[in-house]
Amino acid sequence: MSELEFRFASEFNIKPVPWLWDGWIPRGFLGVLAGHPGIGKSQIAIDIAAALSSGRRMPNHARGHLEDDEFVMLLSEDPIEELVVPRLIAAGADLGRIAVEAQIKGDKGFNFKDHEELLRRALERRDSHLALLVLDPMTLFLGQGNWRGYSEAYSSLAELTKLADDFDFTIFGVSHLNKKSELTAMQRIMDSSAFAGAPRFLLMAARDPVDERLVFWVEKNNMAARPPHLEYEIQERVVADYEVDGEQRIATGPPVTTSRVRWIGVSDKSGGELLRTEGGSKKLVEDTLQKIQKGAIEGEWFTVRGLAAVLELGRRSAQSRADALVKEGLLESRNVKGSKEREYRLTSKDSKDSIEAKEAKEAKANGR
């Protein structure tokens, strides 16, 4: 008959958390990258994989941690030759260190529910070690299941967690957010709280609906302090198949237009605020105007520093938000004499009605 034994904390030696990307992606755990469609989640996943594979700096200029005998696997629903590989090339990936397909003879395609044992055997017989597995989208490669139900979803994610721990590699899946803006960021991942509870780390991306800036951040990470948010944009690139000659890449095929992430720098925007207002610029405009009205005296001009204090944003984000409101006709601006700075003020005493007035004017002009 089996007996239960206890082990005390004094019997264990502490050890540091291993990282693939310090403060962002720990090694050997399950994580999720979530956000609405159209903000470049897949591009971010590709950029992270590319940076690790090539040894270039990560988006915040830190070093990634991928050993010489390690590789990355990126499984995507997108066409490999038309989208995945061109994007990897544009991101500067070492294509020889990124697997983009898991082939199974006589089967439709890989998924964990049906093929976990095959994956385990494949990893055991390889000389090189898998360090990161990206699933885009996550549910496609989990296999058929009830992902709305907490118990079934959590059970499947727990199996992924065990696989990552057994082979010491990181799994992160790309996922969408539900449309319930009244919920917290973590409550909006998929349609089950299991997708927020089971993973050890959660990465998120969102668009500011006023100034259109894109922001990427760590929403959950219980192994380190959360790093600053990062701002990014999606840029068009032209690439081609190539051969490596020394340190140069020599094009060997026709040009292909694709895209990649360009990292701009640290962002002082609040990810939680962006998710509460994403998809509804009117709500964010109203919130911004209300904050300005509370801190404004009629006719008062705000410097960027003063506006940042009122909006509780950094100076760059405050000016970006203000410039967007100027375009909407809700603020006016002018140059500060003897300076390159600008200052802003409300366009009228009753600015809270200006949104509705502007919409009524546009509707009248359009004959509605």
Image (cartoon, rainbow, N blue to C red):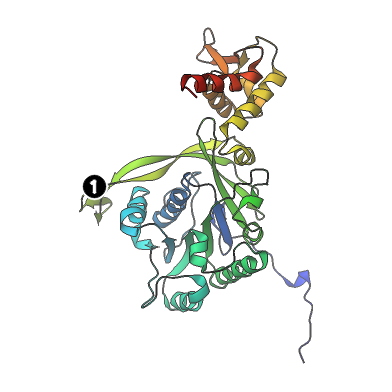
**Nearer to me, 329 or 249:** 329
In this rendering, is residue 99 above or below 366?
A: below
In this rendering, is residue 119 above or below 242?
A: below
Horizontal and vertical percent for residue 65? 49, 57
Residue at the disc numbered 1 = 255
* In this picture, residue 307 sits left or right of residue 105: right
Horizontal and vertical percent for residue 312? 66, 29
Residue occupying the point 64% across, 17% down? 351
Amino acid type of disc 1? Pro
Number of numbered markers: 1
Q: Secondary structure at mark 1?
A: loop
Residue occupying the point 61% across, 37% down? 277
**Residue farthest along the top direction in this orientation:** 337
Residue occupying the point 53% across, 21% down? 328
**Nearer to me, 245 or 41:** 41
Residue 105 in sight from this viewpoint: yes
Residue occupying the point 34% across, 55% down? 85
In this rendering, is residue 155 above or below 42?
A: below
